[in-house]
Image: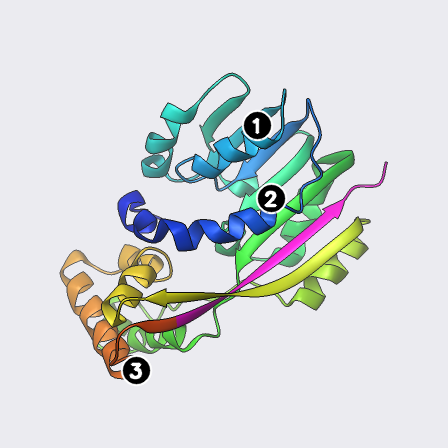
């Protein structure tokens, strides 16, 4: 997808907050090899590297625009590569991902695959948004089914790959994970108004639609969603609770 780093970071404080909860799940060790899936612009990958002394950390992302901003954070023991999450190879002591694997389908296949790339004694630590049942997501789906957008999209609407916390715990156990931790947390974001909610959605959930729509329909599509948000959130500020799932497991020694 064509990510816009500036728009994504417009809500940097809110988007970075779950990272601190995720990094608290990591067993800190020196001299390990770690892989950050979906590293984006690299700020969080750098923080991960600083938490794991004398380690080698590689951040991968499929967005050239994001990696363009990440490259100036490269340092001894910290590097970045253009690569898909599904194209990982080798063995790692830590596979880490903050808000990225929700874009990958078939998590029932993905989670065992990720664990298969972890060395004995290593760890998988993941955070993903689980806000797909929020009313704002329904506005996006509804608009995608309306004309002229439905015809332009050829009937496509986004499907969500995120599972329940129970299903993730079962996947981790069935993949021989141990020290399993799985939980869901709501982050109580307070945004200025409905326009801010639209900006938030434009930086992530709306992107797959804009990527498939012709340029001349981008503004109309955003406009329809904006009107629905304004009707639903007429006041200021707007309370925007955001669900996220966290899970971690170790590979047996």
Residue 200 showing in the rendered view: yes
Could you tell me residue 205's position as x and y percent? 37, 61
| Marks 1 and 2 close (CB-CB < 8 Å) | no
Magenta stretch secondary structure, dominant: strand
Look at the picture and state if 225 lies above or below 187.
below
Could you tell me residue 218's position as x and y percent? 19, 62
| Marks 3 and 1 close (CB-CB < 8 Å) | no
Q: Going from the N terminus, do you reach mark 1 or mark 2 first? A: 2
Binning the other alpha carbons within 10 Å of mark 2 as few (below 14), some (14 to 19) or many (20 upward) gives many
Q: In which quarter of the image is residue 173?
A: bottom right
Nearer mark to the viewer, of 1 and 2: 2
Look at the picture and state if 58 lies above or below 250.
above
Secondary structure under the numbered disc 1 in the rendered image: strand
| Residue assigned mark 1 | 57
Residue 88 showing in the rendered view: no
| Residue assigned mark 2 | 23
Could you tell me residue 126's position as x and y percent? 61, 49
Measuring 33% from the left and 78% from the top, which residue is drawn there?
A: 142
Measuring 38% from the left and 26% from the top, which residue is drawn there?
A: 71
| Residue assigned mark 3 | 232
Left or right: 110, with 75 as reference point:
right
Q: How far apart are marks 2 and 3 (CA)?
A: 35 Å
């Amino acid at each position: 997808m064509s990510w816009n780093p500036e728009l994504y970071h417009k809500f940097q404080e809110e988007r970075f907050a779950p990272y601190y909860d995720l990094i608290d799940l990591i067993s800190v060790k020196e001299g390990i090899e770690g892989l950050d899936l979906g590293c984006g612009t690299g700020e969080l990958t750098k923080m991960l590297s600083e938490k794991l002394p004398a380690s080698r950390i590689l951040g991968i992302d499929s967005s050239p625009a994001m990696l363009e901003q990440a490259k100036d954070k490269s340092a001894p023991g910290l590097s970045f590569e253009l690569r898909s999450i599904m194209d990982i190879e080798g063995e790692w002591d830590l596979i880490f991902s903050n808000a990225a694997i929700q874009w990958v389908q078939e998590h029932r296949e993905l989670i065992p695959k990720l664990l298969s790339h972890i060395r004995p004694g290593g760890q998988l630590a993941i955070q993903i948004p689980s806000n797909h049942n929020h009313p704002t997501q329904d506005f996006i789906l509804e608009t995608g089914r309306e004309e002229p957008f439905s015809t332009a999209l050829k009937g496509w609407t986004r499907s969500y790959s995120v599972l329940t916390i129970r299903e993730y715990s079962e996947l981790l156990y069935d993949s021989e994970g141990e020290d399993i931790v799985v939980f869901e947390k709501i982050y109580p974001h307070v945004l200025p108004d409905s326009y801010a909610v639209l900006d938030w959605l434009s930086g992530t959930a709306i992107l797959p639609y804009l990527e498939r729509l012709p340029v001349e329909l981008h503004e109309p599509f955003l406009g329809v969603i904006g009107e629905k948000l304004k009707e639903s959130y007429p006041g200021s500020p707007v309370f925007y609770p955001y669900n996220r799932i966290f899970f971690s497991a170790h590979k047996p020694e």
